Every structure is written in structure tokens, then in C-alpha cells.
Amino acid sequence: MGVPILFGWGKKGKQIGYIGIDKCPNCKNYAHFNLYEYANNFRLYFIPILKWNKKIYLVCSRCEAAWELDDEMKKVFIAESLTSPNQEITTLIWNKVGKIIEININSIMEKYPDDFITPLVELCIANLCDEISDIASIRKISLKYLEMIFDNDKAK
Ligand SMILES: [Zn+2]
């Protein structure tokens, strides 16, 4: 994603979308990522009359590192934010998936040493699908959680 631009976001940026949990290349935490719009406002007698230089940034919620998105990436991430569950539901799935994986990972790894990822993800789906109808998100978040468990380069 290139070099992040770091700023204290304060209230300058406007949050326009939520992406989900991913590893931050800057702080190396698995953190919530949001889309922010940031525009320079031109003010006349304190009345904002136009916005120019409108830019979209992907921002890590933990360290506030921000990456400016080019037009192609804007489309990708805006589409992603429209299909992702919101932060509250993502957090709920993340926590539930985490419990299921941590309780079962040792026995599943013993039983299926060649591919324990697939049965673990299936187990998460089987346990949560009555409660959460968004199976694609359970699958995606389970895979991300497993990536985090085996990531030796994550933040401690
Ligand atoms: Zn970060």
C-alpha cells in the first residue's frame, strides 16, 4: 500500500465507510479500517463554499496511519465497504470466531494435520450460521483470524 501519511485525524476527516478488520502495515495490529474523505474547504466569511482536492483515505483505527487511495483503489474499497458488515457486527463475529478457533484449534490440527484451516472455518460457520446469516463474512473473518494466529510479525 506504500508509505502511509500519518496525521492526527481529529475531526478533519469525515468517515464515509467501514472496511473491516485487517493487518495494519504500519502498526502491525489487526485493526478496524475505515474510509475517510478529506477535503480542503474554501471559506468565504467563514461559510464553506466549495470543496476541492477531495481525497479518500484508508485509515487504521489503532495508529491512525492513512493511505491515500487512487481512483482504482477508491472503487475497490468503496465496493468493499458496501458489502462488509458494520464495525459492531464485525467485532461480534471476530470475537465469536476467535473463541471457537481457540477452543478447537489443537484438536482440529491433530485430526487434520494437512488442512486444518478448512475444517476450522467450516466449524465457525456451522456454529454461527443460526445466529448470523452472513456466511461470507463469517468465512472471511475466520480466515483473517487464522492469519492473525499464525502471523509472526504482528504487534504484540
Ligand atoms: Zn495501524
Image (cartoon, helix red, strand yellow):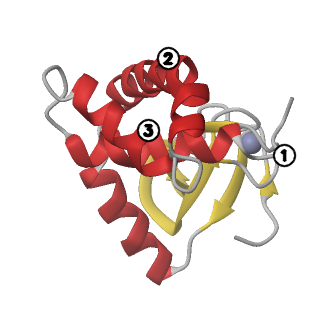
Q: Which residue is mark 2?
A: 99
Q: Nearer the viewer, residue 103 or 136?
A: 103
Ligand 1 image-quadrant field: top right
Q: In the shown orientation, is residue 32 left or right of residue 86?
A: right
Q: Which residue is mark 3?
A: 120
Estimate how packed mark 2 is, as few (under 14), some (14 to 19) or many (20 or more) residues with alpha carbons within 10 Å. Answer: few
First in residue order: circle 2 vs circle 3: 2
Question: Do we see residue 18 in this rendering?
Answer: no
Question: Could you say which quadrant of the image residue 30 lies in?
Answer: top right
| Residue at screen point 31% across, 44% down | 137
Question: Do we see residue 87 in this rendering?
Answer: yes
Front: mark 3 or 1: 3
Element at label 3:
helix
C-alpha span from label 3 to label 1: 20 Å
Up-down: is 138 above or below 81?
above
Residue 19 place in picture, x, y as percent? 44, 48
C-alpha span from label 2 to label 3: 12 Å
Residue 108 place in picture, x, y as percent? 51, 34
| Ligand 1 neighbours mark 3 (CB distance < 8 Å) | no
Circle 3: residue type: Leu
Estimate how packed mark 1 is, as few (under 14), some (14 to 19) or many (20 or more) residues with alpha carbons within 10 Å. Answer: few
Residue furthest to the front in view is 111
